[in-house]
């Protein structure tokens, strides 16, 4: 059923397309309209920052895009697949195959090595067809520059290294899209730029990345900025000249990159 939908819809299409997507959280007495009708298209290979005040609907949007939750209304097509039509098992399956997640707090298992953390999604899902788990895990760690830390535990790694382990874990299933909810929120400026250098490198390799950030300095490394307010998109702009995180690191630019006054 998934496959036929894929064939019907996948004529050189946006990897993400939403039509008037709404989300209402209903706790009985109170209803919160977190998304009020989102039309959004994201093409393969984009690097997108989602910005907006707290409570504006960013995480809700990311959860829907990541197939963690269904929209209340409207349509969501992921890689041509009409997500609304999927049952829970199909939703989990498409999530495992197409999406990698990165979170603000890294979400690594503490008593588990970097290698085992990265390998975990392969053990949970039916990914045998994409290759040998140990080899895929080594490749993912190599892509984030952490081959030499495979046997370390999270508490033996810096915050930036832990987040790169989390990025490797997001990559190990070879997803089409990486979704990151404030991935630099717990990191200092220099480490944040290192994470953006990793994202920019992965994006150059063709991975679509959508990340939530509060910081204009971080959004400046993306190629498109979408701003949410009160459940609506109020701005959607191309960034004409995204900053190059690798060059900024070389030039020591983090020392001046973020004056406190520039932050929202
Ligand atoms: P952001 O990530 O931009 O801070 P969220 O998407 O988390 O915003 O939240 C958008 C709105 O939806 C807020 O008003 C928030 O309180 C509400 N909300 C988010 N998650 C839930 C939930 N699980 N149940 C009820 N309300 C929620
Ligand atoms: Mg949020």
Image (cartoon, rainbow, N blue to C red):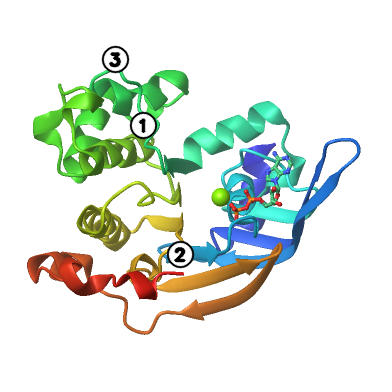
The crowding category of the residue bearing disc 1, from other C-alpha atoms within 10 Å (few below 14, some 14 to 19, many at least 20), is few
Mark 1 in CB contact with mark 2 (< 8 angstroms):
no
Q: Is residue 124 left or right of residue 198?
A: right
Depth order, front residue of 221/99:
221
Quarter of the image with the N terminus is top right
The image shows residue 215 at horizontal and vertical percentages of 41, 65
Residue drawn where x is 19% and y is 73% of the image: 256
The image shows residue 43 at horizontal and vertical percentages of 50, 66
The image shows residue 120 at horizontal and vertical percentages of 37, 22
Answer with mark 2 or mark 3, whichever residue precedes in sequence: 2
Residue at disc 1, secondary structure: helix
Residue drawn where x is 87% and y is 43% of the image: 30
The answer for how far apart the CA atoms under marks 1 and 2 are is 29 Å
Answer with mark 1 or mark 3, whichever residue precedes in sequence: 3
Figure check: 53 above or below 243? above
Instruction: Tell me the residue that label 1 is attached to.
Output: 130
The image shows residue 5 at horizontal and vertical percentages of 68, 47
Instruction: Tell me the residue that label 3 is attached to.
Output: 111
Q: Is residue 117 left or right of residue 237?
A: left
The reply to whether residue 12 is in sight is no
Instruction: Tell me the residue that label 2 is attached to.
Output: 49
Please identify, in this view, whether the residue under mark 2 or under mark 3 is nearer the observer.
3
């Amino acid at each position: 059923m998934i496959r036929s939908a894929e064939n019907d819809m996948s004529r050189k299409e946006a990897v993400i397309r939403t039509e008037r997507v709404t989300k209402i959280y209903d706790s009985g007495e109170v209803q919160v309209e977190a998304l009020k009708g989102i039309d959004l298209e994201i093409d393969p290979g984009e690097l997108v920052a989602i910005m907006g005040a707290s409570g504006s609907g960013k995480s809700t949007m990311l959860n829907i895009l990541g197939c963690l939750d269904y929209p209340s209304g409207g349509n969501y097509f992921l890689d041509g697949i009409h997500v609304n039509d999927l049952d829970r098992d199909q939703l989990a399956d498409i999530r495992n195959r197409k999406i990698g997640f990165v979170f603000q707090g890294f979400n690594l298992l503490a008593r588990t090595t970097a290698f085992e953390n990265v390998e975990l999604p392969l053990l949970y899902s039916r990914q045998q067809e994409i290759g040998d788990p140990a080899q895929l895990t080594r490749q993912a760690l190599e892509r984030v520059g952490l081959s030499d830390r495979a046997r370390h535990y999270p508490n033996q790694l810096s915050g930036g290294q832990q987040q790169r382990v989390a990025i490797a874990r997001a990559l190990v299933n070879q997803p089409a899209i990486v979704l990151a909810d404030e991935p630099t929120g717990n990191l200092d400026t220099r480490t944040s730029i290192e994470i953006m250098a990793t994202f920019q490198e992965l994006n150059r390799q063709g991975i679509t990345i959508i990340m939530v950030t509060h910081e204009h300095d971080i959004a400046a490394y993306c190629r498109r900025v979408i701003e949410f307010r009160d459940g609506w998109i109020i701005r959607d702009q191309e960034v004409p000249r995204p900053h190059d995180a690798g060059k900024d690191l070389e030039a020591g630019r983090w020392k001046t990159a973020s004056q406190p006054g520039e932050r929202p």
